[in-house]
Image: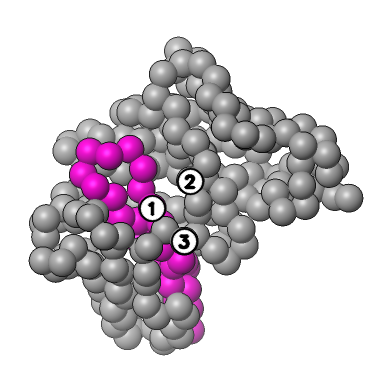
Amino acid sequence: ETGVTQSPTHLIKTRGQQVTLRCSSQSGHNTVSWYQQALGQGPQFIFQYYREEENGRGNFPPRFSGLQFPNYSSELNVNALELDDSALYLCASSQWGADTQYFGPGTRLTVL
Amino acid sequence: GQNIDQPTEMTATEGAIVQINCTYQTSGFNGLFWYQQHAGEAPTFLSYNVLDGLEEKGRFSSFLSRSKGYSYLLLKELQMKDSASYLCAVRDRAYNTDKLIFGTGTRLQVFP
């Protein structure tokens, strides 16, 4: 158990809909990173939040957006869902500058 | 560009030793992680190498050669529970972002 929680566990949406995924970071951690993991692939970096500001972004379109709250929890929002958005979405929390990121259990998103 | 290569699948026998290789070519490098991921679960931290050489932790060891862009994870005294995917990830701290760049993962099956 890493102390990082995510909700919901599973989600089914249809194309064109919008989705919000949530992540609670481990106590004492001020940085949250989001990753997308398609089936059979390694996780891909979406973006990172540090002290409520976006702190770097991977190769994902603007319809992927996020927030970090004062308690360092975070949301990932995806608009205009596409079939290829079906994946496991992982959040990882860390203390800025520390070596290790701790992953939550993930949210499995299926887009039909 | 960012390129991390590792074998897609490996098989081994319970009690044996297996070595999983990872080669990388990335624009930034601030260390290399190995994570274990059981099907449908979050990646869990195994090791982190920043300097060249071998790091040993129980049945698992990890090696890094920065000049060769090469790492391996060595698993000894294999157990059935070691059947999982093993992810090699490069830490990249460029542009004030602290992100992980993952390979596609190596699926290890341990047979009795």
Q: Residue at x 63, y 44 (%)?
A: B106
Q: Secondary structure at mark 2?
A: strand
> Quarter-wise, where is residue A7 in the image?
bottom left
Q: Residue at x 27, y 39 (%)?
A: A98
CA–CA distance between discs 2 and 1?
A: 8 Å
Q: Which residues are magenta?
A: A86-112
Q: Residue B39 location in percent, x, y? A: 62, 62
Amino acid tagged 3: Glu
Q: Residue B32 location in percent, x, y? A: 44, 32
- Local packing at callout 3 (Cα closer than 10 Å; few below 14, some 14-19, many 20+) is few
Give me the disc on residue B99. Answer: none
Read off the residue under disc 2.
B45
Amino acid tagged 1: Tyr
Amino acid tagged 2: Phe
Label 2–label 1 contact, CB within 8 A? yes
Q: Nearer the viewer, residue A3 or B66?
A: A3
Q: Residue B9 location in percent, x, y? A: 71, 45
Give above or below for A43 relative to B66: below
CA–CA distance between discs 1 and 3?
A: 9 Å
> Quarter-wise, where is residue A111 in the image?
bottom left
Give above or below for B104 relative to B41: above
Read off the residue under disc 3.
A1
Q: Secondary structure at mark 3?
A: loop
Q: Is residue B36 magenta?
A: no
Q: Nearer the viewer, mark 1 or mark 3?
A: 3
Give me the disc on residue A102. Answer: 1
Q: Chain of mark 1?
A: A
